[in-house]
Image (spheres, rainbow, N blue to C red):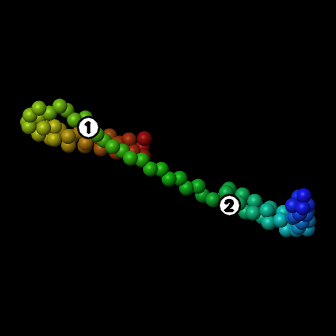
Amino acid sequence: MDDHVQEKIALRDYSRVFLKRRWTIITVFAVTVVTVTIHAFTATPVYKATTRLIIDKENPNVVSIQEVMAVDASGTDYYQTQYKSLKAAASPGR
């Protein structure tokens, strides 16, 4: 029972301090809210995006070394075509 009485006294002490300093507390709270609001509306938004582009060509079923060499020779054309396609898509005119 003694703990309950002391708890009530502590709460009364806190409420008395709050009431005594209420204008200081309200002023600090209002200044903080106004400052954060002004900053939120005047700050320049910064967006960051990242992406990863992987151009993979499916590997054909290679049976002989001649087919492997033919795939390597045509692989350059494939990547050049993909590069040109991406460059055209990224041009500002589109």
Q: Secondary structure at mark 2?
A: helix
Residue beneath disc 2: 39
> For mark 2, does the 10 Å Cα neighbourhood hold few (<14), some (14 to 19), or many (20 or more) residues?
few
Question: What type is the residue that disc 1 sits on?
Answer: Lys
- When asked about the image quadrant of residue 60, the answer is top left
Observer-side mark, 2 or 1, equals 1
Q: What residue is at 87 percent from the left and 61 percent from the top?
A: 3
Residue beneath disc 1: 57
- When asked about the image quadrant of residue 19, the answer is bottom right
Q: What residue is at 60 percent from the left and 58 percent from the top?
A: 44
Residue 23 rendering spot, x and y as whole percentages: 88, 66
Q: Earlier in the sequence, mark 2 or mark 1?
A: 2
Q: Image height check: is 59 above or below 22?
A: above
Q: Does the rendering let one see residue 18?
A: no
Residue 7 rendering spot, x and y as whole percentages: 87, 61
- When asked about the image quadrant of residue 76, the answer is top left
Q: Image height check: is 81 above or below 9?
A: above
Looking at the image, the residue that sits furthest to the front is 1
Choose between 66 and 90: the one closer to the eye. Answer: 66
Q: What residue is at 16 percent from the left and 41 percent from the top?
A: 72
Q: Image height check: is 67 above or below 53?
A: above
Question: What type is the residue that disc 2 sits on?
Answer: His
Viewed as shown, does residue 18 lie left or right of 92?
Answer: right
> For mark 1, does the 10 Å Cα neighbourhood hold few (<14), some (14 to 19), or many (20 or more) residues?
few
Q: Which quadrant would the C terminus be assigned to in this image?
A: top left
Q: Does the rendering let one see residue 94?
A: yes
Q: Secondary structure at mark 1?
A: loop
Marker count (numbered): 2
